[in-house]
């Protein structure tokens, strides 16, 4: 009886977290009974079902969550588990505090503006691929105080405000070992990440202002990654390899590229960069520890109708490689880390089937990227169109496979001393010398022109 009363007290405490919603309660620990109770509650119009068993763990069934969020739930719950129940329901089990945290995270995502497509109607409803910060510290063996922190984050872009706040927190913890001189934060450029964290009005228009939750989560995640990298610093051997990846990107503005001088275009085999560079990090004994891959492709496999937070194709590639290495990491304090970093992304698109009109299904006008004069109807198609999640998987797998191929290929050893450079430059008053690419003159303050307003074929609307 005492256990039951304790469970009831825990249930009431959890119910207090959701005062507007109906719920039901059961002590049934068996999975089938839990699902039966969830079905009954759903039939009765309840949106949440909380089931507590006598072991003190909590089961949450949330009718509004997509089964695609099961993986994210499992990660959030640590030693717990999560799996889909009947349609639209997720069953997750774990320690009470872990479940509470998971519920809070998922609920907080509801309706949160996403960054990338500048679409005010695109708000987050769940998680497709969880977002991470991956930090790498490089230091000289003879002088560990000479170091460089490189962080790749699954986000639309890096933020000066986030970077300065991260550095402030790192200095509070590690003193002058890290500063704006030796900390670089770069983003994969996924267009399916939360918005409102950049600190500049332009980028906050579609998120309706600064979003403290996005900002804090990003800062805290980056600091946690930096802390782990700092603690894991140890002797390592570095090398690099590069190779051509042909099936993971196309030029989304081929007619614009064709306006370049013929002599310039003749220098290249393709109208978009196809080179992948991989930095390989081993222990001195030869065990793999981490890799960094640079390849130019927009993480826009998930289009602007997507409402799931996602690392897109770069996030997929990262997880493919890290899971591949997981069995080999037994006994190591830290698992294998794979950072798929954005490089010269620009007009590189993962929608390799080309552009088509949403209304007719015919190819878009080549010269204008429009459909009967309407640019909003011209959309790029990924390799598994119309399944964007499958296209994300395919483009991510291509990058992962190429990175693994380059990992196994002979590489060039990286030796010598470590150095870094950082500078702030006022781009509005730069003197430009005459060259084959530019006329002599002086730059002016930045402005947005017609091309910005037109958007791109990856999204059919505006995009950052």
Image (cartoon, rainbow, N blue to C red):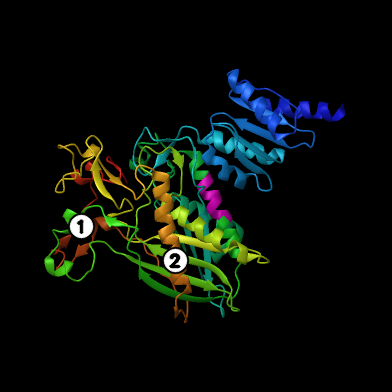
The residue lying at 61 percent from left, 58 percent from top is 173
Q: Which residue is mark 2?
A: 403
Q: Is residue 230 left or right of residue 385?
A: right
Residue 354 in picture, x, y percent from top left: 26, 50
Q: Which residue is mark 1?
A: 443
Closest to the observer: 4 or 188? 4
Closest to the observer: 136 or 173? 136
The residue lying at 56 percent from left, 72 percent from top is 145
Quadrant for the N terminus in the image: top right
Residue 234 in picture, x, y percent from top left: 61, 72
Q: Which residues are magenta?
A: 217-224
**How busy is the neighbourhood of tag 1: few (under 14 within 10 Å), some, or many (20 plus)?**
few
Residue 101 falls in image quadrant: top right
The residue lying furthest to the right in this view is 1
Residue 91 falls in image quadrant: top right
Q: Is residue 290 above or below residue 308?
A: below
Q: Is residue 188 visible?
A: no
Closest to the observer: 44 or 332? 44
SS majority, magenta = helix
Label for residue 76? Answer: none
Q: Are marks 1 and 2 in contact (CB under 8 Å)?
A: no
* SS for callout 2: helix
* SS for callout 1: loop
Rounded to the nearest angstrom, the CA distance separating label 1 from label 2 is 39 Å
The residue lying furthest to the front in this view is 32
Q: Earlier in the sequence, mark 1 or mark 2?
A: 2
Residue 432 in picture, x, y percent from top left: 19, 64
């Amino acid at each position: 009886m005492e256990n039951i009363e304790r469970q009831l007290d825990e249930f009431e405490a959890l119910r207090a977290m959701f005062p507007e919603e109906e719920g039901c309660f059961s002590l049934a620990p068996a999975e089938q009974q839990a699902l039966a109770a969830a079905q009954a509650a759903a039939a009765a119009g309840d949106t949440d079902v909380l089931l507590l068993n006598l072991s003190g763990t909590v089961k949450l069934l949330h009718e509004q969550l997509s089964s695609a969020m099961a993986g994210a739930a499992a990660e959030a719950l640590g030693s717990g588990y999560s799996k889909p129940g009947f349609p639209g329901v997720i069953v997750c089990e774990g320690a009470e505090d872990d479940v509470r945290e998971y519920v809070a995270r998922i609920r907080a995502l509801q309706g949160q503006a996403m960054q990338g497509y500048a679409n005010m109607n695109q708000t987050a409803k769940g998680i497709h691929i969880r977002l991470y910060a991956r930090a790498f510290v490089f230091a000289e063996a003879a002088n560990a105080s000479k170091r460089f922190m490189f962080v790749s984050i699954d986000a639309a872009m890096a933020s000066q405000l986030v970077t300065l706040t991260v550095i402030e927190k790192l200095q509070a913890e590690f003193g002058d070992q890290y500063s704006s001189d030796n900390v670089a934060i770069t983003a994969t450029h996924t267009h399916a990440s939360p918005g409102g964290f950049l600190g500049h009005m332009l980028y906050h228009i579609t998120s309706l202002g600064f979003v403290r939750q996005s900002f804090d989560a990003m800062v805290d995640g980056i600091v946690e990654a930096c802390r782990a990298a700092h603690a894991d610093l140890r002797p390592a051997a570095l090398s690099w390899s590069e190779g051509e990846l042909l099936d993971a990107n196309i030029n989304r503005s081929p007619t614009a590229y064709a306006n370049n001088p013929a002599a310039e275009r003749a220098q290249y085999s393709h109208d978009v960069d196809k080179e992948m560079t991989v930095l390989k990090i081993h222990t001195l004994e030869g065990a793999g520890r981490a890799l960094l891959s640079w390849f130019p492709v927009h993480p826009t496999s998930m289009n602007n109708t997507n409402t799931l937070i996602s690392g897109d194709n770069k996030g997929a590639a990262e997880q493919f490689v890290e899971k591949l290495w997981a069995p080999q990491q037994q006994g190591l304090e830290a698992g294998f880390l794979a950072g798929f970093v954005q490089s010269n992304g620009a007009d590189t698109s993962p929608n390799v089937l080309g552009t088509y009109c949403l209304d007719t299904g015919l190819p878009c006008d080549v010269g204008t990227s429009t459909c009967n004069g309407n640019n909003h109807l011209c959309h790029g198609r990924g390799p598994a169109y119309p399944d964007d999640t499958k296209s994300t998987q395919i483009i991510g797998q291509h990058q992962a496979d190429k990175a693994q191929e380059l990992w196994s290929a002979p590489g060039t050893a990286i030796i010598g001393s470590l150095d870094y450079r950082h500078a702030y430059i006022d781009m509005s008053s730069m003197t430009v010398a005459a060259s084959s690419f530019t006329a002599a003159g002086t730059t002016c303050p930045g402005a947005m022109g017609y091309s910005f307003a037109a958007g791109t074929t990856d999204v059919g609307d505006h995009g950052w």
